[in-house]
Image: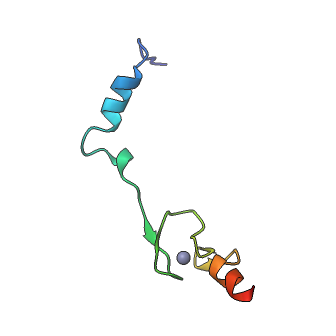
């Protein structure tokens, strides 16, 4: 198996990562269908919805009940 000959320094690694046009420094978002807030994919939204379903009691609903 091909092995790198030298360890890539933190400096060189970061220069590669943060040089322009790299997909690594872009965060993908999707819009929640329940609250239409931008959210990260594959994560529960702040309103407690995941994949269009309510999976957690939302903070707003909990406050309304209290
Ligand atoms: Zn939401």
Residue 48, image x, y percentages: 63, 74
Q: Quadrant of residue 15?
A: top left
Name the colour scheme: rainbow
Residue 23, image x, y percentages: 34, 48
The residue at 42%/17% (across/down) is 4
The residue at 51%/81% (across/down) is 35
* Left or right side of 40 for 58: right
The quadrant of the image that shows the C terminus is: bottom right
Query: Front-most of 25 and 4?
Result: 25
Name above or below for residue 19 compared with residue 30: above
Query: Front-most of 63 and 16?
Result: 63
Q: Give the farthest residue toward the right.
A: 66
* Left or right side of 40 for 21: left
Residue 38, image x, y percentages: 44, 71
The residue at 70%/74% (across/down) is 56
Q: Give the farthest residue toward the bottom.
A: 65
* Left or right side of 20 for 9: right
Name above or below for residue 30 compared with residue 18: below
Residue 13, image x, y percentages: 37, 28
């Amino acid at each position: 198996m091909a092995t790198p000959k030298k360890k890539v320094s933190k400096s060189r690694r970061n220069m590669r990562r943060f040089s322009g046009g790299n997909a690594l420094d872009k965060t993908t978002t999707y819009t929640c269908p329940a609250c239409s807030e931008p959210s990260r994919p594959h994560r529960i939204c702040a309103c407690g919805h995941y994949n269009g379903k309510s999976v957690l009691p939302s903070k707003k609903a909990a406050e309304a009940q209290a």
